[in-house]
Amino acid sequence: MSDVLALTKALIERPSITPDDAGCQPMLAGRLARAGFACESLRFGEVDNLWATHGSDGPVLVFLGHTDVVPPGPREAWSSDPFVPTERDGVLFGRGAADMKGSVAAFTIALERFVAEHPAHRGTVAMLVTSDEEGDAIDGVRKVADLFRERGQRIDWCITGEPSSKAKLGDLLRVGRRGTLSATMTVRGVQGHVAYPEKARNPIHQALPALTELVARRWDEGFETFPPTSLQISNVHAGTGANNVIPGDMQVLFNLRFNPHWTAPELERECEMVFEAHALDYVVHWHRGGEPFHTPEGPLREAARATLAAVAGAMPEESTGGGTSDARFIAPLGAQCVEIGPVNASIHKVDEHVRIADLEALPDLYFDLMRRLLA
């Protein structure tokens, strides 16, 4: 059994449902410490974070990942226990196999090998992992990034191991991510009888024109490889359960995914201007999940493109699609960020899995990136 397969299995066996690390990080820290890394445990609230470094000065290359996983759902729906790593037909099954314990194991193996073969490498290689990526993402990398700002910790390049590949390992290079902004909004009306609308004020009737305007708006035309900004309403709730009562209020949840044309405060102002133009009596609570980031052409993008072309046999697609990742907290530190990982077809699903051949190719892939940038 290969080292990376064995380590991935050991991580899957630990049921680290977010935010519980379940002992994954101490195991990784023990290995990296034996390889000569300085390891620091950073715990905030119920969240564990591991910061492991080798070398000094710059440039600083960081591998970013997470040990937490989403809940498995109904155990009986799985072909095998989600926390018992199982091989079938060249595939490894288990919760976290693709997202992203396989990548974290590959980081670790690649880092051990790199410092053994290049003990006098230039700059610093590091690994940062959290147990709060799949959860609230408050006490994980977000909090660590705040600490790094206070310390003046430099990060030049960041490689996140999120499962980014589409059909074949290395067929996609993530060079940025959209920002995310969520709103929880209450529109206040006056409850009353549907037969006497003049004695009431229907918050649904008031809110719909404003919401329609926001949904229909063409926010922009995109930005380089970014798609246009979009707004999606995810939940609407109003009413007492009776069909003859005008509700007294209405709750709406919506989310904007936005490109670098915008910042979260700018979008908040744009939305609130629409609400006020429609004379809504409302209160809105905003959650800024992360600003967009984009890695321009430079050493990291060049090295990643060359490495993935060698792995996949063709130049990778370069994309800013998908959801969010913890790189959104590292990019504002001044780091260039890319995301490279296994195929994402099964993530968060029943019978999550990774091809063993892909898993065993990942350490060489990450090693090659270090070699190109720091050896």
Image: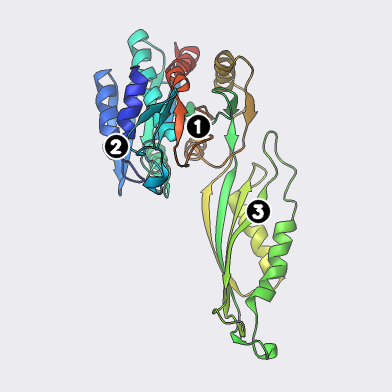
Q: In the image, is 367 to the left or to the right of 250? A: left
Report the amino acid beneath label 1: Pro
- Reply above or below: 50 against 288: above
Q: Is residue 19 above or below residue 281?
A: above
Q: What element does badge 3 sit on?
A: strand
Q: Residue at x 57, y 48 (%)?
A: 180
Quadrant of image for the C terminus: top left
For discs 1 and 3, the disc positioned in front in the rendered view: 1
- In the rendered view of the protein, which quadrant contains the N terminus? top left
351 or 214, which lies in front? Answer: 351
In front of the other: label 2 or label 3? 2
How many angstroms separate mark 1 from mark 3 (CA)? 25 Å
In this view of the protein, can residue 168 be seen by the observer?
yes
Q: Going from the N terminus, do you reach mark 1 or mark 3 first?
A: 1
Q: Residue at label 2? A: 14
Q: Which circle's residue, 2 or 1, is located before the other in the chain?
A: 2
What whole-number distance in Å separates the C-alpha atoms at marks 2 and 3?
38 Å
The secondary structure type at the circle numbered 1 is loop
Q: Nearer the viewer, residue 68 or 182?
A: 68
Q: Specify which label sits upstream in the sequence, 2 or 3.
A: 2
Q: Which residue is mark 3?
A: 231
How many residues crowd mark 2 within 10 Å: few (<14), some (14–19), many (20+)?
A: some
Three-letter residue code for mark 2 = Arg
Cα–Cα span, label 2 and label 1: 20 Å
Residue 45 picture location, percent across and down: 30, 49
Q: Which residue is mark 1?
A: 163
Query: Residue 114, image x and y in percent?
Result: 38, 13
Is 227 left, or right, of 74 in this rendering? right
Instruction: Look at the numbered disc 2 and give the secondary structure of its residue.
Output: loop
Q: Are marks 2 and 3 in contact (CB under 8 Å)?
A: no
Pick the front one: 139 or 149: 139
What percent of the width, then of the height, locates residue 275? 67, 67
